[in-house]
Every structure is written in C-alpha cells, then in structure tokens.
Image (spheres, rainbow, N blue to C red):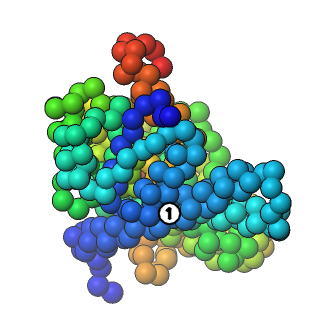
Amino acid sequence: MSIFKVLLVDDEREYVTTLGERMQMRGLDPEIAFSGEQALRMLEHSLPDVMVLDLKMPGIDGLEVLRRVKKRYPQIQVIILTGHGSDRDEAAARRLGAFDHLQKPVDINDLVHIMELAFHQNAEPGKPL
Amino acid sequence: MVEAEPREVAFFGKITAAFTHEMKNVLAIIKESAGLMEDLLALAQDTSFPHRERFARALGTIAAQTKRGIELSNRLNRFAHSPDTAVATVDLHEILEQIISLSGRFARLKGVTLSLHPHADSLATITSPVALQMVVFGCLECCWEAMGTGGNIALSVGRKGREVVISIACESGGGEVEDLAERVFASEGPMVLKKMLQSLNCRIEGSASRAGFDLILPAAV
C-alpha cells in the first residue's frame, strides 16, 4: 500500500498514464486527472498528500490550479512537472507555494524521491530537507 | 535584402518555442515508455526472456537518443526565446555555450571543432541577445570558411578595463587565417557584420600573436 496519496495532473494522457504505471511499480498508487478542472473536482472528494502538476494545459492552467489548491488546501504539496518551464513560470510557481519545479522529462526515481521529500516535509513541517 | 523586423523575429521565436515544447512532450512520452519496458524487463529478471540482452541494448539506445533529442530541444527552445527581450543582460559564458551548441553541426561539416575555455568570473554585457548570437555565429563562419578543413576554434571570455572581451582563436587547420578581423569587417553575406557590430557598440581587434581576433563590448555594470 502506498504510504502517501498522489494525484498526477497532465493533459498528455500517454505521458501521465505511463508515469503512473511506473510509480505503481515503485509502491505508489497515483490517481490521475487529465485537466485542471478534473483535478479540482477530484479534490472535492479526496485530498492527496502530493500533487504533480503540469503547467500548460487547456482550460484552467497549472498556475491557476496551483493558486486555487494552495488557497483551499494548503496542506497539499504541489510539484510542478512541465516541459514549458520559463524562468518566469518557475518564479511564479514558487511564489505561489510550489514545493519544487521540475522539467520534463524527469528521471522517475528522482521524481519519486522529491515526492517523498515533499510528503515528509508536510508530515514534519520545519524539518530541514 | 529585406531585414527582419523585431516583431517578425519575435513571431518566429514564438512559433519555434511552441514546437520545441511539443517535441519535448513527444520525447518525454518515448522516454517514459522505454523506461516502463526497462522496469518490466527488470521485473522479469528471473524468468527466461529470449533476446534479453538485445532488448536491453535497444532500450539503452532509445534512452540515449531521447536524452540527445531533449538536449537539442532545450537548446533550440532557449534560442527561440532569445527575442523575448530586445535588450537583456547577457552572461557571455552562457551565450557562448549556446552558440557553440547551435553552431556544432555547421562546424562539423567543415571538420572544425569548437571549444570554450572557462573563466573564473561571470562576465556580462547588456545587449540584444539575438544580435549578439548572430554576430558571434557570423564571426565563427568567417573563421571556418578561412580555415579550410579541420582545426579548432577556441572561444574564451575576459575583461579589459570596463569592457568585456570575446576572444576567438583559430588553432591549426590549414587555409589562410591571417587578417581574420578584416575579413569579418568586410563580410557581406546574409549578415552584414560590420553594421551589426556597430549597432552592438562592439569593436573588433585583430591579434598579432595568433590567428584570431577579439570582440570587445561594454561590460554590464
């Protein structure tokens, strides 16, 4: 059983589905949303500990999702995973409270490690990473 | 020749940047799919799997080439974002790394290698990132055309009073590499370097001791 709950949000279906499968093989059991709207609807029923969020998506984009998540559910740790990362987007994401900002593609083991850090940071706030 | 307007350059950059993002998405999907196959192969470690080694080798090739594709996309993406700001503080080392990467294929076709010597300090100038890249590329082009086949072009950065210097040195190779600075100044190709050098407030100085020249720009304060 997964030690923490994960939500992956990305409109690139094949990418996020494969990423999810690889996470399953590493002991996580992520839920997947294919849009910002779907992710926000899912949060009304169940809150993840860690969200991995793409930035550029049709409809509500990643920065807006991040803004709303941090306002309503500040306990959720959000990791940005994007192929569109400008310095300006990264600065905005960090200002809004993103735990980290990663560029696609990322090494799966690095990503899982950062997700664990995010989860533990939340479980033990103030603990140095 | 009709010169490109800044807004046309910006449009070109915007479209190119969007496509590099899409290319990165494609490469990311290939990478994860190959990664999943590697995971599955590792899971089946104890079971017999015909051609396991060949399969693993092919997956390794996919991973390596995907990595290469991503690096190329990142370089092209950074280049495409160059016109985002008409004038910016430009780190000389970073922009030379970028130019070397973008020029690599052109140089290879001439049998010339490009190298960048590190500098301890971060040196910057305030200029048009697009124009500076064009000027340095144009200078490199003059060099490898003059060098004939083979050799190395060494780039380095330095400081000279209140100015910063990009040094370009042609090492070995054949050809006639004397008076390179004059050749650059007289270049009348698609990039009229003389005009661009002036617009960048950039001087060019030849070197008596080596085949090459220096581009001298105002340092960013």
Task: Indicate the quadrant where residue A93 lies.
Answer: top left
Badge 1 crowding class, 10 Å Cα cut-off, few under 14, some 14 to 19, many 20 or more, is many
Pinpoint residue A84: horizontal percent, then vertical percent.
36, 55
- Toward the bottom, the furthest residue is B1
Reading the image, the residue beneath label 1 is B29
Amino acid found under the numbered disc labelled 1: Ile
Count the marks: how many?
1
Pinpoint residue B75: horizontal percent, then vertical percent.
49, 60
Foreground of the two, B199 or A102: A102
Describe residue B153's horizontal placement relative to residue A20 as left or right: right
Q: Secondary structure at mark 1?
A: helix
Pinpoint residue A27: horizontal percent, then vertical percent.
55, 38
Residue ID at (35%, 31%): A49
Describe residue B141's horizontal placement relative to residue B46 as left or right: left
Foreground of the two, A19 or B129: A19
Q: Residue A80: in sight, yes or no?
A: no
- Up/down of B126 relative to A2, above or below: below
